Image (cartoon, helix red, strand yellow):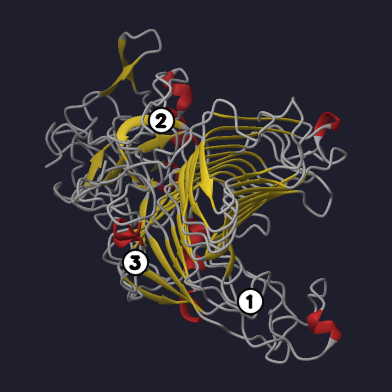
């Protein structure tokens, strides 16, 4: 069973920086007591030989020497006398216990230093002792928690519905509460949560609070993993009074696979709000394959909130049934949201606030959350406020993201950032969709009168917005490129404000390139004020009023008769919101496909998986037109026609417009 794990492999083969292969010999480590024997989170025992043995059920007494034992012992079974069962070594001690216990997860002991980055010369690799590609380190394909090989050194511990905090934390004897389990984790540890439903009031939630000393941080080489055994099958029944999942002042944590179901729950206490997922003051945290349903409407609660966070990856996360914001990225830098889906399902606020000034005042929080004073002053009373909200943040990338059914699909504002300087820089929204939102995109200044600078929106589709497709206030070096707006209930693209005093350098500026606007019930493109510097090129725009603008100066991108220069006339073919028309890409038989002979289509193409803002060359949609959604979460039942899994029906894939 363990061939090539400990016995045959006495070194790791690592590809060196220069491209040459080198065999890294492990240093021999001697022990004096059991507590010396901790390797990547797995506890062992000190044999009579003075070297560490670690659990292995295939050995007679259940232990095998590690690769840090001398050559004649490394990888061999420990015998009852504490020697080698196969080598015939004799020991003089009392032997080794045959009762393996895996409860201590201290990876900071001296015995662990032989496996960290320093021992490999700082090579960015994976400590993978069982050779399956999973293990500890940035080069690993995944963390290793293989139950079929309990002798791996990956620090796997377990939490289960029938567990007990007095247990050892093994799969057969798991822990019970998240508070106990989280406190045991340190760098390199992996906590696996077994399939079940877990009530917040009974077992707590997987929230790591490093600020209060209730949890530890991982390291770049050895992050801490907390994951469901099977995606979507570890369900957190959140009662709305605690954070569901996340970290506070922690670094290098990884979460995966949870479903979080919240309820409306009034509090008798004065209360600050919580959230199903929250990352506060954290660095290098990843959240993947998480499903969230509902938020507590008695409080100012977003579904997924970041505050003061840096270097965060959110991937394949679905948010449903929220009344404030879905993803709220506030005062955070270097955040990537990849293949994120948010659908508010038009969840309304609770009943209107009582006629009390202290309840109705949106700046008053001290009485919020009680039955007498619910949180009901959100921006939109009959649906979620925002699917994606970005404020006071830099370096935010939203790629392959989808918004449905919110008042604002994507809202981006400026403000002062973590360093006290003007934020809202280096923000990109690429290959993403807004479907059925009131307004697809809203850009503008925040309460500090600061707008985002240099926002780029490209290959973006707004489909059937009930009001404006894109509302762009104070555009400051804004770039709108390869954008399609189909079936807008109001204006397709609207610029209502361009206050030069708000924009950097004393002027507002915008570049509009390759816009495709069809079927707007009002103007297709409306400048209610002119940015001081702007251009509109290679676009096709139609609506009830096509293009409106405040003047006909020769410096405008229009001639004296009001016709847009270097733009297309006539109706687009094969693209739009009609039956059989393509909505998220421009097919090769459309007149919008490379009309200028430069290799560029007019309109959006949301067809490729994006990685760090770059097309991967891999398709975003399956051959059946499916978006990469979470597979069948355990709870709750999804409403047909309003779920991620049937998104293909709403983006118009059909026999005449097949999935790209």
Disc 1 + disc 2, Cβ < 8 Å: no
Q: In x, y percent, where is residue 629? A: 33, 55
**Residue wearing tag 1:** 381
Would you say residue 151 is visible in this rendering? Answer: yes
Q: Quadrant of the C terminus?
A: top left
Q: Please state which of residues 540 and 85 is positioned toward the viewer in this rendering.
A: 540
Characterize the local packing of mark 2: few (<14), some (14-19) or many (20 or more) Cα atoms within 10 angstroms.
Answer: many
> Which residue shows up at 85% across the image and 38% down it?
500
**Residue wearing tag 3:** 174
Q: In x, y percent, where is residue 47? A: 31, 42
Q: Is residue 129 above or below residue 436?
A: above
Within the image, what quadrant is residue 552 found in? top right
Characterize the local packing of mark 3: few (<14), some (14-19) or many (20 or more) Cα atoms within 10 angstroms.
Answer: many
User: Could you give the CA–CA distance between mark 1 and mark 2, rounded to whole angstroms?
Assistant: 39 Å
**Residue wearing tag 2:** 601
User: Could you give the CA–CA distance between mark 3 and mark 1, rounded to whole angstroms?
Assistant: 44 Å
User: Could you give the CA–CA distance between mark 2 and mark 3, rounded to whole angstroms?
Assistant: 56 Å
Within the image, what quadrant is residue 279 found in? bottom right
Sooner in the amino-acid sequence: mark 1 or mark 2: 1
> Which residue shows up at 32% across the image and 66% down it?
633
Q: Please state which of residues 211 and 308 is positioned toward the viewer in this rendering.
A: 308
Q: In x, y percent, where is residue 12? A: 29, 23
Q: Please state which of residues 581 and 622 is positioned toward the viewer in this rendering.
A: 581
Indicate the secondary structure of the residue bearing disc 3: loop
């Amino acid at each position: 069973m363990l061939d090539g794990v400990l016995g045959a492999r006495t070194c790791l083969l690592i590809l060196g920086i220069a491209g040459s292969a080198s065999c890294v010999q492990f240093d021999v480590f001697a022990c004096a007591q059991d507590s010396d024997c901790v390797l990547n989170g797995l506890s062992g025992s000190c044999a009579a030989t003075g070297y560490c043995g670690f659990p292995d059920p295939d050995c007679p007494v259940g232990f095998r020497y590690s690769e840090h034992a001398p050559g004649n012992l490394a990888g061999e079974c420990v015998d009852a006398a504490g020697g080698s069962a196969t080598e015939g070594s004799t020991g003089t001690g009392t032997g080794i216990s045959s009762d393996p216990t895996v409860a201590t997860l201290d990876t900071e002991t001296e015995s662990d230093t032989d496996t960290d980055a320093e021992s490999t010369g700082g090579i960015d690799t994976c400590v993978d002792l069982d050779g399956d590609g999973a293990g500890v380190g940035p080069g690993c394909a995944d963390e290793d928690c293989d139950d079929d090989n309990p002798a791996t050194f990956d620090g796997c511990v377990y939490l289960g519905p029938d567990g007990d905090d007095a247990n050892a934390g093994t799969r057969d004897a798991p822990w019970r509460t998240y508070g106990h389990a989280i406190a045991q984790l340190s760098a390199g540890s992996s906590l696996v949560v077994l399939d079940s439903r877990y009530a917040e009031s009974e077992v707590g939630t997987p929230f790591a609070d490093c600020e209060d000393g209730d949890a530890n941080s991982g390291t770049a080489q050895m992050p801490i993993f907390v994951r469901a055994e099977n995606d979507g099958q570890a369900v957190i029944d959140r009662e709305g009074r605690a954070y569901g999942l996340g970290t506070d002042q922690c670094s290098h944590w990884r979460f995966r696979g949870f479903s979080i179901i919240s309820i409306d729950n009034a509090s008798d206490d004065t209360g600050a709000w919580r959230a199903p997922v929250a990352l506060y003051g954290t660095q290098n945290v990843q959240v993947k394959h998480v499903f969230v349903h509902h938020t507590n409407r008695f409080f100012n609660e977003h579904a997924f909130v970041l505050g003061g966070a840096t270097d965060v990856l959110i991937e394949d996360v679905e948010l449903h049934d929220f009344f404030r914001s879905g993803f709220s990225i506030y005062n955070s830098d270097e955040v990537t949201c990849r293949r994120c889906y948010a659908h508010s399902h038009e969840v309304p606020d609770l009943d209107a606030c009582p006629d009390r000034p202290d309840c109705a005042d949106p700046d008053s929080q001290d009485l919020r959350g009680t039955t007498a004073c619910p949180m009901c002053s959100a921006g939109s009373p009959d649906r979620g406020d925002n699917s994606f909200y970005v404020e006071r943040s830099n370096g935010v990338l939203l790629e392959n993201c989808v918004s449905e059914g919110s008042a604002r699909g994507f809202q981006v504002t400026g403000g002062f950032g973590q360093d006290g300087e003007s934020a809202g820089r280096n923000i990109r929204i690429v290959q993403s969709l807004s479907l059925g939102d009131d307004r697809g995109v809203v850009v503008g200044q925040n309460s500090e009168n600061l707008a985002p600078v240099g926002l780029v929106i490209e290959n973006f589709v707004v489909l059937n917005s009930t009001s404006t497709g894109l509302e762009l206030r104070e555009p400051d070096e804004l770039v709108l490129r390869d954008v399609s707006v189909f079936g807008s209930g109001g204006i397709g693209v609207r610029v209502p404000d361009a206050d030069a005093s708000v924009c950097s350098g004393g002027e507002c500026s915008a570049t509009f390139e390759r816009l495709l606007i069809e079927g707007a019930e009002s103007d297709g493109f409306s400048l209610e004020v002119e940015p001081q510097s702007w251009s509109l090129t290679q676009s096709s725009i139609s609506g009830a009023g096509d293009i409106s603008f405040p003047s006909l100066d020769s410096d405008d991108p229009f001639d004296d008769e009001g016709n847009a220069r270097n733009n297309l006339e006539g109706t687009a073919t094969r693209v739009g919101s009609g039956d059989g028309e393509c909505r998220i890409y421009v097919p090769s038989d459309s007149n919008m496909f490379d009309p200028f002979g430069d290799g560029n289509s007019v309109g959006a193409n949301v067809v490729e998986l994006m990685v760090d803002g770059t097309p991967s060359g891999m398709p975003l949609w399956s051959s059946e037109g499916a978006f990469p959604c979470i597979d069948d979460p355990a709870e709750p039942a999804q409403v047909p026609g309003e779920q991620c899994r049937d998104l293909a029906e709403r983006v118009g894939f059909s026999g005449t417009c097949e999935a790209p």
